[in-house]
Amino acid sequence: MNKIKELFMKNIGVSILVILVFIFIVFTLIYIFFGNNISVIEENKIKSDTKIIANYLDDIASNKTNSKDKYILFALDYNNSEYHKNEMTVEEIVNFIKEYFTIKLKEEDLINTGITPLLVDRHIVYDVDKKSFKMNDSSVNVIKYYKIEKIKKLNKKKYRATYREYTITDVVEMLNYYLKKNNETEGIVDENGNYTYNLKDIEPIRNYILGSGNILDIKNSIDDDVENYSKKGGTIKVTYVVEDDKVLIDSVK
């Protein structure tokens, strides 16, 4: 009788253990498949909040070293293109980077960085007296654009976006593509018989070619048709962290 009771108790223990393991596996699978699924709202926020940043990802992605010079380049390239501000003090750069990155930079970090080959290549100089960096020439030979392909939610506050690199070497080819597309676009007739045409605005591209625009005009004109007038490259992965409703770059690989 005692043996039967002992065997029964052992079987209960095993059964309970099996049930607990099963429950753990079920909850783990639920978390994997549903807990980290990104919502449409989250995905749209990442895309909208990083749309402008994506224009300057090459400043970070092209420099694989641990040097802080890439942040100097990013700050100057962004402000020169967006606001025509080609000179920034070290303090301004540090404060600017805080708005877009999780990295904790100090003014001393940038001062000690000095002028590196990357900055020389982009015509950036340092004024010791003013403690400022200045971009003397923002022109580039090729235009790199990063198109977001997918976004993965890593945890509650962290997301990883995969970007595809596209290199545009001939802006005239880009203009010709949109000219042809506009000519081939068929009008949409409404109920009153009026025609509307969804045409691409080619004025910014034309202005850039004529010398009255800047590279930002081209980058802002690029859309999902980029594959038709560029060279497709590799991918980079950018990890974003959402803090206080702000989307910050945590890493670029």
Image (spheres, rainbow, N blue to C red):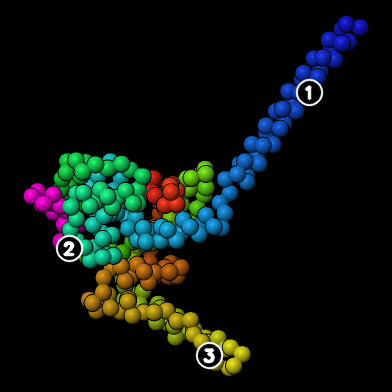
Q: Tags 2 and 1 in contact by the CB under 8 Å rule?
A: no
Q: Residue at x 52, y 44 (%)?
A: 156
Residue under label 2: 137
**Residue 22 x/y as whole percent:** 72, 31
Secondary structure beneath dot 2 equals loop
Q: Tags 2 and 3 in contact by the CB under 8 Å rule?
A: no
Quarter assignment of residue 171: bottom left
Is residue 55 rendered to the left or right of residue 94? Answer: right
Is residue 61 rendered to the left or right of residue 139? Answer: right
Numbered badge on residue 48: none
Q: Residue at x 33, y 51 (%)?
A: 99
**Residue 157 x/y as whole percent:** 48, 45
Q: In whole angstroms, how far apart are the C-alphas of marks 2 and 3?
A: 45 Å
Q: In whole angstroms, how far apart are the C-alphas of marks 3 and 1?
A: 72 Å
As displayed, is residue 67 above or below residue 218?
above
Q: Residue at x 32, y 48 (%)?
A: 98
Residue under label 3: 195
Residue farthest to the left? 129
Is residue 129 rendered to the left or right of residue 156? Answer: left
Q: In whole angstroms, how far apart are the C-alphas of marks 2 and 1?
A: 73 Å
Q: Quadrant of the N terminus?
A: top right
- In the rendered structure, which amino acid carries the disc numbered 2? Asp
Residue 252 visible, this angle: no
Quarter assignment of residue 148: bottom left
Using the image as rendered, state which of residue 12 and residue 236 is in the foreground: 12
Residue under label 1: 15
